[in-house]
């Protein structure tokens, strides 16, 4: 039996929080109607609430302690939206933006700060369609299978399907791929250890390949062996390309020809159920809709103990209470959803294949080594967002925000 002193002397594993020190809490929307799987429904919801009279508008809006129709707030960075109080709003809906809603679920969001309780403007400030990648820690659920860390080029809301929400870590602290969000000196230390240049995306790739969950956050050991590092980075880059789903020049994910899923029987207008036929490797939507082949690994793929395909379907098939804005949605199953489902099956199947080839990292770089090299502890400034901006931001009432 290990004694108390033995436990105390056991070195704590390295955390992603030490390697990528700046992190942001998940978004808190405050009202569900501002997010949805299709942009047309969001525009229709906007029209419904804007056209409503004062008492109904308040009820439809869904006031919270942080936002009411009379809240005065600044515009989100990079978004051209009104900053007058929403109670006086009469214009068109801002163009919805594509976001990552929880793991693997790409949806749409109305990018209006007046409608979102905690939009995390610091994330919008560094959003960059060409360079930025967000590493999203998943909520910790003891013993649950699935990745501890995911990557996206979209703005993530950081929602976890189960467990305590994780953190959102931009790879860069500024737009245009400037100032990596890494412990100062980390890439130089790793380059010296492995004998070749190490870039920010290599560090992210390694983390995607080996991160494992813990109650303290994602654990990311660093290997002593350059060959182990190379194998993990190669696998992580494949995971990154899959999860970016065509962004930043990455190719769209594809399974080999004979394994690509197709819609074999049309999805009914309003499918109410999703099931899996393991013998036929088929997804059954509403009893008559059929998609195959769907590898069993894609159907079983979980994050935080929740099946991703089931959660994705529930987000689109759920029925909201009549009279609410959330009840405004497509009358029939859009063809675009079937296309998105085919791609999601492909992504999950390929991610599952890579998960079946784990990178073994046994001889690790110690915290003492990183401390001796001056990489740790991370300075407090590295945990705060960058403070220098290259554009104006509109504050409440059309005034420029003071930063």
Image (spheres, rainbow, N blue to C red):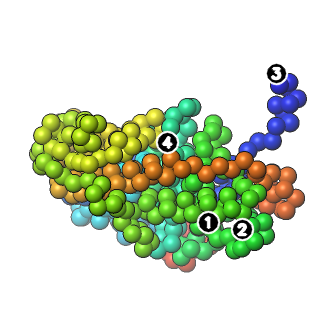
Sooner in the amino-acid sequence: mark 3 or mark 4: 3
Q: Which residue in the rendered view is the most extreme toward the bottom?
A: 390
Q: Is residue 22 above or below residue 323?
A: below
Q: Nearer the viewer, mark 3 or mark 1?
A: 3
| Disc sitting over residue 52 in the figure | none
Query: Could you tell me which residue is drawn at 68 percent across and 70 percent down?
Result: 198
Residue 318 vs residue 114: left or right? left
Say which quarter of the image contains residue 387. Answer: bottom right
Sooner in the amino-acid sequence: mark 2 or mark 3: 3
Q: Which residue does the numbered mark 1 point to in the structure image? A: 202
Q: Which residue does the numbered mark 4 point to in the structure image? A: 146
320, 153: nearer the viewer: 153
Pointer 1 with pointer 2, Cβ within 8 A? yes
Give the Cα separation between the discs numbered 2 and 4.
28 Å
Q: Quadrant of the C terminus?
A: bottom right
Say which quarter of the image contains residue 275. Answer: top left
Query: Could you tell me which residue is drawn at 48 percent across and 71 percent down?
Result: 128
Residue 349 in view: yes
Mark 4 neighbour class, 10 Å CA radius: few under 14, some 14 to 19, many 20 or more: some
Give the Cα separation between the discs numbered 3 and 1.
40 Å
Secondary structure under tag 4 reads loop
Q: Which residue does the numbered mark 2 point to in the structure image? A: 187
Sooner in the amino-acid sequence: mark 1 or mark 4: 4
Residue 385: x and y in percent read 62, 62
Q: Which residue does the numbered mark 3 point to in the structure image? A: 1
Secondary structure under tag 1 reads helix
Secondary structure under tag 2 reads helix
Residue 7 vs residue 305: left or right? right
């Amino acid at each position: 039996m290990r004694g108390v002193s033995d436990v105390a002397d056991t070195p704590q594993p390295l955390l992603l929080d030490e390697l990528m020190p700046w992190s942001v809490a998940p978004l808190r929307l405050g009202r569900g109607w501002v997010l949805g799987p299709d942009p047309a429904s969001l525009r229709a919801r906007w029209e419904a609430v804007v056209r409503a009279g004062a008492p109904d508008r308040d009820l439809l809006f869904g006031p919270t302690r942080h936002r009411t129709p009379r809240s005065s707030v600044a515009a989100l960075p990079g978004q051209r939206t009104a900053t007058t109080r929403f109670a006086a709003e009469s214009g068109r809906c801002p163009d919805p933006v594509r976001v990552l809603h929880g793991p693997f679920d790409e949806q749409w969001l109305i990018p209006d700060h007046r409608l979102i309780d905690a939009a995390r403007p610091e994330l919008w400030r560094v959003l960059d369609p060409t360079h930025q990648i967000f590493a999203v820690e998943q909520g910790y659920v003891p013993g649950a299978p699935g990745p501890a860390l995911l990557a996206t080029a979209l703005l993530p809301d950081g929602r976890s399907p189960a467990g305590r929400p994780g953190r959102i870590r931009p790879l860069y602290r500024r737009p245009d791929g400037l100032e990596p969000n890494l412990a100062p000196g980390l890439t130089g230390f790793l380059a010296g250890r492995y004998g070749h240049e190490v870039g920010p995306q290599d560090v992210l790739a390694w983390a995607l390949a080996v991160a494992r969950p813990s109650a303290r956050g994602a654990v990311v050991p660093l290997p002593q062996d350059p060959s182990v590092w190379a194998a993990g980075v190669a696998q992580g880059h494949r995971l990154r390309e899959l999860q970016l789903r065509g962004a930043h020049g990455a190719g769209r994910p594809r399974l080999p020809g004979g394994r690509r899923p197709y819609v074999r029987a049309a999805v009914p207008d309003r499918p109410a159920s999703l099931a899996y036929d393991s013998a036929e490797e088929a997804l059954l939507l509403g009893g008559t809709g059929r998609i195959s082949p769907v590898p069993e690994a894609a159907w079983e793929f979980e994050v935080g103990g929740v099946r991703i395909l089931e959660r994705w379907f529930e987000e689109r098939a759920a029925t909201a209470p009549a009279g609410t804005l959330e009840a405004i949605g497509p009358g029939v199953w859009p063809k675009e959803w079937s296309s998105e489902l085919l791609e999601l099956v492909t992504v999950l199947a390929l991610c599952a294949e890579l998960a079946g080839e784990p990178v073994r990292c046994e001889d690790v770089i110690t915290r003492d080594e990183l401390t001796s090299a001056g990489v740790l502890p991370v300075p407090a400034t590295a945990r705060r967002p960058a403070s220098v901006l290259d554009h104006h931001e509109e504050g409440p009432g059309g005034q420029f925000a003071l930063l």
